[in-house]
C-alpha cells in the first residue's frame, strides 16, 4: 500500500513525496482513511511508529476546506510537552507546504504577546500544551467553541504529568459535535475512562501490544555499583567501544543531567544537555545542534523522552534506570525508528533491581545482561594543574633575603601534590602556632605516629628552649 491509496489530496501526496516517504506505516495506513471519514479514533501505538503523521496528514486535507475566524481556531492538538508541540508544528509546515493553512503554537517559555497576535488573525490549527492553553483561556484571549476537531496526543504521558483534569475542562469548552482523536502508547484505566467520556463510537486501532518495545532495538542491562564515578566510567567505556553516531543519554534528575554533561565534555565528548530548568529557546537551540550534528551526544531528562523524532539516533543509554516502566519504552524508542536498528543500554545499580523487574514484566521480555570491564582511559583534556609555590617576598634594600630550606619540617605532614603551594607561608606558620597551642604539635612529633626521628632543621620552638641563665 502507498500513500496514494489512502485518499489524500494531490497537494498532500506531493508534500509527502518531497520528504522521501513512499509507504505508510501500519498506524498511518489504518488511521488516515478513518480520520478522513470523520470517525473518532483511539490509536494505540508504541512510540516511533509514525502516529504523528497519521493525524497531521488527514487534518491538513480536512482543514483545506473552510476558513478561519478570529479567536476561534478550527482544530486543536494537545501535546504534553513544549518539544512535542513544536515538533507537531514542524510537521504541519512540512506537509502543509502546498496548502494555505494558518497555525498557532501555544507553549510556555516564550512571549505570550506574539501568541495572542497570531490568535487574533484566526488560525486553522492550534497546537498547544494544556497549561498555556488554560492560561490564555482564563485571560479571555481565546475561544474554543468554533473548534470542530480535537487531537489528544500522548494521552498516557498527559496522565503521568497530571494534565487529565485540564484536558477534561478543555473538552467541555469545545462543541459537543466534533471529531476527537486520542493517541497513546499505553491504555491504562484512567485513559480508557477519558476516552469513554469524550469520544463518540470511536474506532480503536492497535498496531502493537501496549508497552511492547521495538523488536529492532537490541537491549542490554549493564550491572554497576552504586557509585556515580563508576557509572560514568562504564558509560564512557561504552561510548568508546560502540559505533556511536548519535546517542541520547537519559537521567532521572536534572542535576544529574548537568553533572554528566559537564563530565563528558571534560573527557572530550561532543555533548549537550536538555532538561526542564532550561528556557525554551535554549532547549530548542540545543536540539538544533544535535540534529545538525554539531554535537552527537544529548544528555536529557524525561522531558525529551516522548515523541521527539530525531533521525539517525543509533544508541540510547539509560544512565539511571527509569522509575516508571512506561518511561523505559518511550526512552529507548528514540532509536530504531522508521525501520532502522538501534541499541539501548541501561546501567543498573543494586537499588534498581525492582525497577528492572517491573520493566521486564511490562514488556514481557527478559533483557540480557552484559558485564563491562573498565579499561584504562585517557586523562581529561582539561586536567587541573597544581598551583606553583609562591615566590618569596623581596628583602628590603641592603638586607639579604632569607634562604628557604629545601627540607620539610618533620612536624608537618607531607603535602599532597594537588595541594602544594595552595597556602601562603604565613598561613602555614599560623597553622603551626595553632597546633602548638592545642598540644597537637607534640602529638604529631610522637615517634609512634610518625616513625623514627629524622632530625630537626628548623627554628627551635619556644617550649623546647633551655634557659642557660639558671
Image (cartoon, helix red, strand yellow):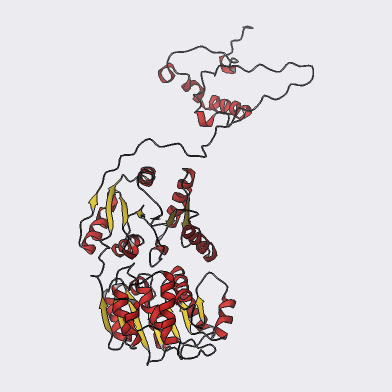
- In the current view of this chain or complex, which residue is farthest to the bottom? 177
User: Which image quadrant is residue 147 in?
Assistant: bottom left
Q: Is residue 265 above or below residue 135?
A: above
Residue at 40% x, 84% y is 9
In the image, residue 61 lies at what x, y percent?
42, 84
In the image, residue 393 lies at what x, y percent?
70, 25
Side of 124 where 433 appears, left or right: right
User: Which image quadrant is residue 190 in?
Assistant: bottom left
Q: Nearer the viewer, residue 99 or 205?
A: 99
User: Which image quadrant is residue 375 in?
Assistant: top left
Instruction: Please say whether residue 165 is visible from this viewpoint.
Output: no
Q: Nearer the viewer, residue 23 or 175?
A: 23
In the image, residue 88 lies at what x, y percent?
44, 73
Side of 142 where 248 appears, left or right: left
In the image, residue 269 lies at what x, y percent?
46, 47
Side of 192 where 273 appears, left or right: right
Q: Is residue 62 above or below residue 455?
A: below
Q: Is residue 413 above or below residue 198?
A: above
Instruction: Please say whether residue 349 is visible from this viewpoint.
Output: yes
Amino acid at each position: 500500500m502507498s500513500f496514494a491509496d489512502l485518499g489524500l489530496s494531490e497537494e498532500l501526496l506531493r508534500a509527502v513525496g518531497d520528504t522521501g516517504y513512499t509507504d505508510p506505516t501500519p498506524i498511518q495506513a489504518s488511521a488516515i482513511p478513518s480520520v478522513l471519514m470523520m470517525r473518532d479514533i483511539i490509536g494505540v501505538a508504541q512510540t516511533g511508529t509514525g502516529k504523528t503523521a497519521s493525524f497531521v496528514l488527514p487534518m491538513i486535507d480536512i482543514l483545506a476546506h473552510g476558513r478561519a475566524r478570529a479567536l476561534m481556531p478550527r482544530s486543536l492538538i494537545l501535546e504534553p510537552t513544549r518539544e512535542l508541540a513544536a515538533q507537531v508544528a514542524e510537521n504541519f509546515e512540512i506537509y502543509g507546504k502546498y496548502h494555505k493553512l494558518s497555525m498557532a503554537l501555544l507553549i510556555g517559555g516564550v512571549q505570550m504577546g506574539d501568541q495572542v497576535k497570531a490568535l487574533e488573525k484566526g488560525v486553522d490549527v492550534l497546537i498547544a500544551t494544556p497549561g498555556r492553553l488554560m492560561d490564555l483561556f482564563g485571560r479571555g484571549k481565546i475561544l474554543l467553541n468554533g473548534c470542530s476537531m480535537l487531537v489528544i496526543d500522548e494521552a498516557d504521558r498527559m496522565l503521568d504529568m497530571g494534565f487529565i483534569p485540564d484536558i477534561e475542562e478543555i473538552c467541555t469548552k469545545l462543541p459537543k459535535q466534533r471529531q476527537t482523536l486520542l493517541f497513546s502508547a499505553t491504555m491504562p484505566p484512567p485513559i480508557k475512562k477519558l476516552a469513554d467520556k469524550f469520544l463518540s463510537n470511536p474506532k480503536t486501532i492497535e498496531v502493537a501490544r501496549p508497552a511492547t518495545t521495538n523488536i529492532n532495538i537490541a537491549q542490554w542491562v549493564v550491572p554497576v555499583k552504586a557509585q556515580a564515578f563508576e557509572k560514568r566510567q562504564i558509560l564512557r567505556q561504552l561510548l568508546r567501544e560502540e559505533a556511536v553516531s548519535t546517542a541520547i543519554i537519559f537521567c532521572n534528575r536534572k542535576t544529574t543531567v548537568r553533572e554528566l554533561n559537564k563530565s563528558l565534555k571534560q573527557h572530550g565528548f561532543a555533548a549537550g544537555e536538555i532538561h526542564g530548568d532550561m528556557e525554551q529557546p535554549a532547549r530548542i537551540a540545543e536540539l538544533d545542534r544535535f540534529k545538525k550534528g554539531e554535537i552527537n551526544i544529548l544528555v536529557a531528562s524525561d522531558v525529551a523522552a516522548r515523541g521527539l523524532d530525531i533521525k539517525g539516533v543509533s544508541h540510547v543509554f539509560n544512565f539511571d534506570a527509569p522509575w516508571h516502566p512506561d518511561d523505559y519504552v518511550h526512552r529507548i524508542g528514540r532509536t530504531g525508528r522508521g525501520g532502522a536498528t538501534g541499541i539501548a543500554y541501561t546501567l543498573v545499580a543494586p537499588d534498581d533491581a525492582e525497577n528492572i523487574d517491573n520493566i521486564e514484566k511490562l514488556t514481557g521480555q527478559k533483557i540480557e545482561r552484559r558485564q563491562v570491564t573498565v579499561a584504562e582511559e585517557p586523562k581529561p583534556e582539561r586536567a587541573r594543574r597544581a598551583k606553583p609555590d609562591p615566590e618569596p617576598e623581596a628583602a628590603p634594600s641592603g638586607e639579604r633575603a632569607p634562604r628557604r630550606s629545601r627540607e620539610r619540617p618533620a612536624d608537618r605532614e607531607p603535602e599532597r601534590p594537588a595541594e602544594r603551594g595552595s597556602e601562603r607561608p604565613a598561613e602555614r606558620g599560623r597553622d603551626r602556632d595553632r597546633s602548638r597551642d592545642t598540644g597537637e604539635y607534640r602529638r604529631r612529633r610522637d615517634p609512634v605516629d610518625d616513625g623514627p626521628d629524622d632530625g630537626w632543621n628548623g627554628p627551635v620552638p619556644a617550649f623546647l628552649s633551655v634557659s642557660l641563665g639558671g
